[in-house]
């Protein structure tokens, strides 16, 4: 009987420690961990709504619109003179090499807003 109790507590500890690794919360602003950023377009806007990248390096933003509500069906990068349709649940990639400054992106009516901060 006693070995059983010990085994059970080991299993409980294992379950607790693996559960912890999943609980890191995503920050609202992503940092430059890579050159590829996934951005979700929901009814309330872009998530994350800002990313930070280094100047002179190509960056790819992968936009996925996940909601038919709101007005995220069009994506505009005014300073890049670039406009894309975002089909529902279909990733759309935008790649560019930014200079220092900010690169804004918006919905087709300039209501939803996001920004790439380039350092
Ligand atoms: Cu809009």
Image: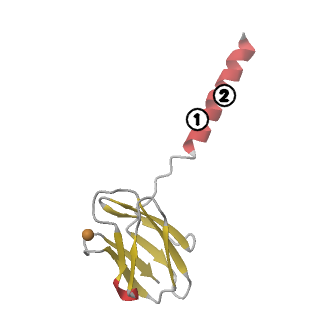
Query: Which quadrant of the view contains residue 43?
Result: bottom left
Quadrant where ligand 1 appears: bottom left
Q: Earlier in the sequence, mark 1 or mark 2?
A: 2
Relative height, residue 93 to residue 57 (above, below): above
Horizontally, residue 113 falls left or right of residue 48, namely left
Front position in the image: 40 or 86: 86
Horizontally, residue 15 falls left or right of residue 114, namely right
Give the number of the disc on residue 48. Answer: none
Secondary element at image label 1 = helix
Q: CA distance from mark 1 to mark 2?
A: 9 Å
Query: Which quadrant of the view contains residue 88?
Result: bottom left
Relative height, residue 21 to residue 5 (above, below): below
**Residue found at x 48% / y 86%:** 98
Q: Position of residue 12 (x, y in %)?
A: 62, 28
**Residue beneath disc 1:** 16
Q: Position of residue 72 (x, y in %)?
A: 33, 66
Give the number of the disc on residue 11. Answer: 2
**Residue found at x 43% / y 60%:** 27
Cβ–Cβ under 8 Å for marks 1 and 2 = no
**Residue found at x 52% / y 82%:** 54
**Residue found at x 53% / y 78%:** 59
Q: Position of residue 90 (x, y in %)?
A: 47, 62
Image quadrant where one finds the N terminus:
top right
Front position in the image: 88 or 48: 88
Relative height, residue 115 to residue 42 (above, below): below
The 10 Å Cα crowd at callout 2, few under 14, some 14 to 19, many 20 or more, is few
Mark 1 vs ligand 1: CB below 8 Å: no
Secondary element at image label 2 = helix
Horizontally, residue 119 falls left or right of residue 105, namely right
Question: Outermost residue, top direction?
Answer: 1
Front position in the image: 82 or 99: 82
């Amino acid at each position: 009987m006693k070995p059983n109790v010990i085994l059970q507590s080991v299993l409980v500890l294992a379950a607790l420690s693996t559960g912890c690794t999943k609980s890191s919360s995503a920050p609202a602003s992503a940092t430059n961990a890579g050159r590829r950023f996934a951005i979700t377009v929901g009814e309330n806007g872009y998530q994350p709504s800002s990313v930070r990248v280094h100047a002179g390096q190509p960056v790819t933003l992968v936009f996925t619109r996940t909601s038919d509500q709101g007005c995220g069906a069009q994506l505009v990068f005014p300073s890049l003179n670039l406009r894309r349709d975002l089909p529902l649940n279909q990733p759309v990639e935008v790649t560019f090499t930014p200079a220092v400054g900010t690169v804004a992106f918006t919905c087709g009516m300039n209501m939803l807003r996001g920004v790439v901060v380039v350092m």
